[in-house]
Image (tube, grey):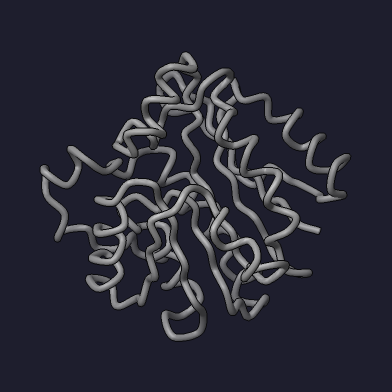
């Protein structure tokens, strides 16, 4: 069993500004652990996490792959999150490289078909458009959950970048909930980009029915 990365350096004040790991986070960690052998088999050179928050997911990937074996890039619109990500990497001896950025727009030209492991636990909670707009504009903790109509506005924007980022053997792990329309996501990725997908984990957490999709060529 791969241990959860140490977050003892983070405080209540940090969690007032950055999303604290919860059931969706742990579902993603469990999915990555279940695929650990396959991920190592890729011999990943570049890993990219979108919306890294505390940095716990990328630190966990570092434990799977080996902290010196890959470049671990992390983006977030929240400046506090990039700071926490860097601190979590240091705490767990994984050299994370946090970037203050929206999704991966600033990286697409440099990472064309180069990302071996791509992960995103997006803001998937259905909200009104104004709440989504405020969260993205203010780049605060609400950006970690406010997903707009069907909880899919941020995810939809990123799905259009995935094909250009994934390496020929790359894997993309995406957290979703039932309200996001999981079958529609899978159908879109197949029809638009010929990317295959599989539900690698699903579980109920309170009122949420969580899914983790693995998407690959």
Locate residue 7, reporting x and y percent.
Answer: 22, 58
Q: Residue at x 65, y 35 (%)?
A: 156
Locate residue 87, reporting x and y percent.
Answer: 23, 65
Q: Residue furthest bottom?
A: 68
User: In the displayed structure, does residue 204 sit left or right of residue 138?
Assistant: right
Q: Residue furthest top?
A: 128
Q: Quadrant of the N terminus?
A: bottom left
Report how many numbered discs are placed on residues in the image: 0
In the depicted view, which residue is nearer to us: 7 or 105?
Answer: 105
Q: Residue at x 43, y 28 (%)?
A: 205
Q: Quadrant of residue 90?
A: bottom left
Is 74 located above or below residue 213 in the figure? Answer: below
Q: Residue at x 11, y 43 (%)?
A: 12
User: In the displayed structure, does residue 144 sit left or right of residue 194?
Assistant: left
Q: Quadrant of residue 175?
A: top right
Q: Quadrant of residue 10?
A: bottom left
Locate residue 102, reporting x and y percent.
Answer: 48, 48
Q: Residue at x 25, y 59 (%)?
A: 83
Is 42 located above or below residue 155 in the figure? Answer: below
Q: Quadrant of the C terminus?
A: bottom right
In the depicted view, which residue is nearer to us: 163 or 178?
Answer: 163
Locate residue 111, reporting x and y percent.
Answer: 63, 69
In the depicted view, which residue is nearer to us: 141 or 124?
Answer: 141
């Amino acid at each position: 069993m791969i241990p959860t990365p140490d977050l003892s350096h983070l405080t209540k004040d940090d969690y007032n500004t950055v999303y604290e790991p919860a059931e969706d986070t742990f579902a993603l960690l469990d999915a990555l652990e279940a695929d650990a052998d396959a991920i190592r088999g890729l011999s990943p050179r570049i890993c990219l996490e979108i919306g890294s928050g505390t940095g716990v997911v990328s630190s966990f990937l570092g434990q799977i792959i080996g902290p010196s074996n890959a470049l671990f890039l992390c983006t977030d619109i929240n400046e506090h999150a990039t700071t926490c990500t860097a601190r979590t990497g240091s705490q767990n001896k994984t050299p994370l490289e946090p970037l203050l950025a929206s999704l991966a727009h600033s990286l697409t030209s440099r990472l064309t078909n180069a990302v071996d492991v791509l992960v995103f636990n997006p803001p998937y909670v259905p909200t009104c458009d104004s709440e989504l707009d405020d969260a993205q504009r203010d780049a605060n903790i609400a950006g970690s959950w406010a997903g707009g109509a069907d909880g899919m506005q941020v995810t939809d924007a990123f799905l259009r970048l995935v094909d250009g980022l994934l390496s020929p053997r790359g894997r993309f792990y995406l957290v979703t909930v039932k309200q996001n329309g999981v079958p529609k996501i899978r159908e879109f990725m197949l029809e638009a980009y010929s990317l295959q997908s599989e539900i690698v984990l699903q579980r109920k957490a309170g009122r949420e029915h969580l899914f983790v999709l693995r998407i690959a060529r």
